[in-house]
Image (cartoon, rainbow, N blue to C red):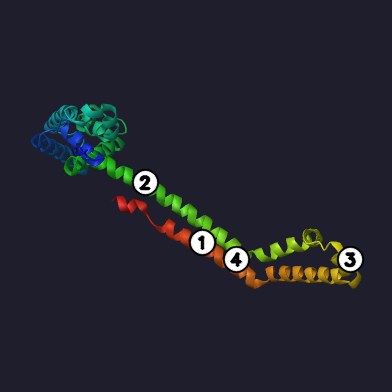
Amino acid sequence: MPEPLVPRQPERKAAAIEARPHRSRVLHWTAFAGSAVSLFLLAAWLAEPTGMPRGDWVGLDLLLSAAAIAEFLTRSGLRWNARRYAVAHVFDFFAMVPALWLVHRGLPFETLWLWLFLLARGARALDRAAGDGFVRKQLLLLLGAFEEEITDRVMLRILTRVEEDLARGRFGQAVGQALLANREPVLARVRAATPIDGALGGVARLAGIDKAVEQAEARAYDAIVEVLGSAEVDRAIRDVINASFANLRAEVGTKSWRGRT
């Protein structure tokens, strides 16, 4: 008997979201229309402020703010996770403030507050038009892109500084000088690792072969030190390191946030 098919994780998630309570499209687009009118009303008054706003404008702004509060409390997201939804839609709380009524009552720092309310109403209208959560998603994307750009710039500065130091440094020469400073201990260790024992050792010492071997080892050691201290070895070391840095620069240049737009 075949086993029953188990829905995959994305399908289960989509089904769970679909099973949650949803609002009607009429209410959604009515809310968008109200947010657009509220935005236009405040923008029109800011464009040509004439002392105190007219009474009918204040009344309309109060009515739209009350409607916005009622509409916000009916949003489905509040029933899924009220705290999380409210934090993600903090601009709604500023957009629902009856700004013209506050001006009429005497608002301190009026210009600053009115521009804040205007931006909040613009964000609310955009969120209603593009879909619930659009503003939050774009804001998170913007913050992520900003963080990545700053991190990449710092990384590129570090790479540039290291490459400049590499261009001035002579690594092979440094290694050669270290080997030269420890020449006798290293040669003694080599001789101890390759002893000539027994009768063959005695014959070698009588014939002076052991001294010739030691001299050959010393010459080979000095030749290695000379090669390591050459410009060619330094250039080869820099080429290898620079190739690794080139790959790292290519990885840094790849902007992951662009793939999320």
Q: Do the CB atoms of the residues marked 1 and 4 lie less than 8 Å apart?
A: no
Q: Residues within 10 Å of mark 3 (few under 14, many from 20)?
A: few
- The amino acid at mark 2 is Gly
- Work out how far the residue at label 2 is from the one at label 3, CA to CA, in angstroms: 76 Å
- Viewer-side residue, 232 vs 219: 219
Q: x, y (%) of residue 42?
A: 19, 38
- Work out how far the residue at label 3 is from the one at label 1, CA to CA, in angstroms: 53 Å
Q: Residues within 10 Å of mark 2 (few under 14, many from 20)?
A: few
Residue under pointer 1: 244
Residue under pointer 4: 237
Element type where label 2 sits in the image:
helix
- Work out how far the residue at label 1 is from the one at label 4, CA to CA, in angstroms: 11 Å
- Above or below for 53 versus 168: above
Front: mark 3 or 1: 3
- The amino acid at mark 4 is Ile
Q: Which mark is residue 144?
A: 2
Element type where label 3 sits in the image:
helix
Q: x, y (%) of residue 235?
A: 60, 70
Q: Is residue 56 visible?
A: yes
Q: Earlier in the sequence, mark 1 or mark 4?
A: 4
- Work out how far the residue at label 2 is from the one at label 1, CA to CA, in angstroms: 27 Å
Q: Which mark is residue 111?
A: none
